[in-house]
Image (cartoon, coloured by chain):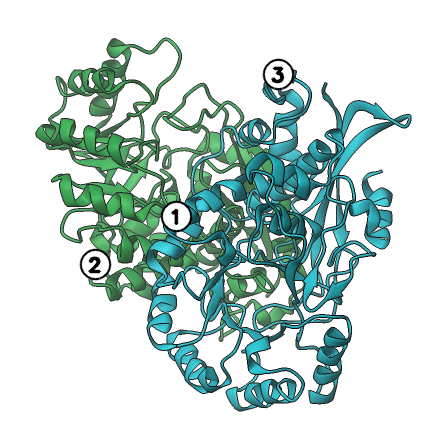
Chain colours: A green, B cyan
Amino acid sequence: MRITDIREATASISSEIQNAYVNFSQMTVSVIAVESDVIRGGKPVTGYGFCSNGRYAQGGILRERLIPRLRAAGEADLLCEFGDNFDPHKIRDVMLANEKPGGHGDRAVAAGALDMAVWDLVAKIDQLPLWRLLSERYNSGRHDERVMVYPGGGYYYPGKGLDRLQDEMRGYRDQGYTVVKMKIGAVPLADDLARMEAVMQLVGGNDLAVDANGRFDLAEALVYGEAMAPYNLFWFEEPGDPLDFQLNAELAAQYPGALATGENLFSIQDARNLIRHGGMRPDQDWIQVDPALSYGLTEYLDIIKMVEGLGWSRRRLIPHGGHQLALALAAGLQLGGSESYPGVFQPFGGFADDTVIVDGLAEPGEHIGIGMENKIDMFNEIQRLVG
Amino acid sequence: MRITDIREATASISSEIQNAYVNFSQMTVSVIAVESDVIRGGKPVTGYGFCSNGRYAQGGILRERLIPRLRAAGEADLLCEFGDNFDPHKIRDVMLANEKPGGHGDRAVAAGALDMAVWDLVAKIDQLPLWRLLSERYNSGRHDERVMVYPGGGYYYPGKGLDRLQDEMRGYRDQGYTVVKMKIGAVPLADDLARMEAVMQLVGGNDLAVDANGRFDLAEALVYGEAMAPYNLFWFEEPGDPLDFQLNAELAAQYPGALATGENLFSIQDARNLIRHGGMRPDQDWIQVDPALSYGLTEYLDIIKMVEGLGWSRRRLIPHGGHQLALALAAGLQLGGSESYPGVFQPFGGFADDTVIVDGLAEPGEHIGIGMENKIDMFNEIQRLVG
């Protein structure tokens, strides 16, 4: 059993939206196909992957470092002990050989995309939905039939007023979502409070999450926190720089509500530092590391162990990214939930076309592998780019 | 005044050496030329830059993100207020626009190479050695005539025994170095102790630095620390994972000698976390952030301010990398010293060809700009690659 081809390409997910930090008019992702010599229905079984949004495509690192190492590896270096499937853990070690420690950024994104394709391939070879494979291998067969999901939305974009923000949120409720999220931090506090209160005409504060995308310094975060405390929000996300653990700890000491952060932490080391130094409260706060940005599901398995070793429940993990991989691992490994993108980062954002949201919960479905073939617009684009 | 062309290419610095973590047989760096419309001697004034070793070339990020943003910028977005030179701070903001916070890795390396070329260009337009320009702009004209330098050496490579390790160290002493450095952590402790004691037949322990390149877990670091404490070493470098600040703090609480780390921290946020959470002792430990890996000299100026704001002296900063940029900023901004590469990472390692080392000190020289034109083998390679 061997890998016969690895193809990668760059896809555009550009849009007019912006958060408090960046606009997405030039945003791209890497798309990958890992083809095997296993033939089913006359065609080679192939795994597909892509990186999550926000950090751009990683073609250079993939083409110059990670993919050549896989191509150069011996067959046995990539297979599990029984030789009847690939071993994502061994593949990770091969693709990251001769990479120095530290500096977890673009490299982690590149590896995340490639690792997604590997897991899709592995689940397809086992003829299982990825979430079932994860449940059997790593969770004693336990799993969740339904996963808490929330739409990452409420972006700023040109000409968007309170009416359109309310329309957007009403749309999410009509689609079956319970908790909704909106961006804050790109306009003055009074304007953001008016935006929040407009949304709270439709949903209770305890179903509203807000996301500052790392924009605030400590003083701003505290002022926002004090102003928002009466709303009893679902969470206050990424208040300050993702690596300013001290800011997070000082805010956590004063802000009574839940905090959430981690989408811009790209390794087990960085996530561990958040828990060690960030003042996060295991009974109420949320960790949002995204496997499709941070070396993949393989590293995420280690992150779950690390988190539990530090006394946290895996239920406090809700991955960023709104992709099928996150939904699969939330279901199979019984995490707290998954972000969802019903409206943005198309065609890569969101779940399979037949995924129905009821009472804010999504079922992972019985699609073999990650199930990208069942998200038609996305899969057509993947096919066009990497066959 | 405008940038007329930006060229980039990948250069090999492959060699047979290895440290405790990686081998360098596939190692590359990015090389950059930033050409201006300022004509001197009939030729456009051009700045050159490259990234430091260990993290590979970054052509993808440069070609897809950083360089296009500079090309698309308006003239005024890149110039200082008087319009008679480029402004590296404004250029940094342009090249990193729409980049999310966190994830400081390959992107920081790409920016470091481009930023080096910008500073070389700026100093050339001002017709000053870079270290003099830094001294005048940021250090009230103060500077150091001579800079403490030490050779980054003592690597493991095939067939190298104690004799050849001693020969290497004897060679550094003959070249004028006082403090020397060797790698540890790739062989059992007893073997490493024998290697250290072989070197200490030539140099006092207080002139020997050892470097574990992030290899040890806490238990190993403590065992090595206890075994090495009697040697009274110059420093014990990068004992554990560069982001395991807790390990560093626990080691610092037990190991009496100096610690040094930071070459794998690529941003002001990561360096700040080392000081906040890593237990580093401002009276004896060393911080080794490398400007040619961490967004460049422009970010390094902010790092100096941050370090001093937290009560540290800039004399505790000794940049990794062994390049002329580090020597220039150590001299012009009065840091603690600079690494040097008389033997490795050629042709990019090391200083100008006419740099003489006396009593472990190097003079930065009067070459205009960074002075890469005066390191002939390297400059020939740069000319071949990016004109």
**Relative vertical location of residue A369 with respect to residue A23 in this rendering, above or below:** below
What's under tag 2, amino acid-wise?
Trp
Outermost residue, left side? A230
Give whichever of A115, B353 is nearer the camera: B353
What's under tag 3, amino acid-wise?
Ala
Residue holding disc 2: A312
The answer to which quarter of the image holds residue B246 is bottom left
- The image position of residue B135, as x and y in percent, is 61, 41
What's under tag 1, amino acid-wise?
Leu
**Relative vertical location of residue A49 with respect to residue B69 in this rendering, above or below:** below
State how many labels appear.
Answer: 3
Identify the element where label 1 is drawn. loop
Give whichever of B356, A176 is nearer the camera: B356
- Left or right side of B353 for B359: left
Q: Chain of mark 2?
A: A
- Left or right side of B220 for A73: right
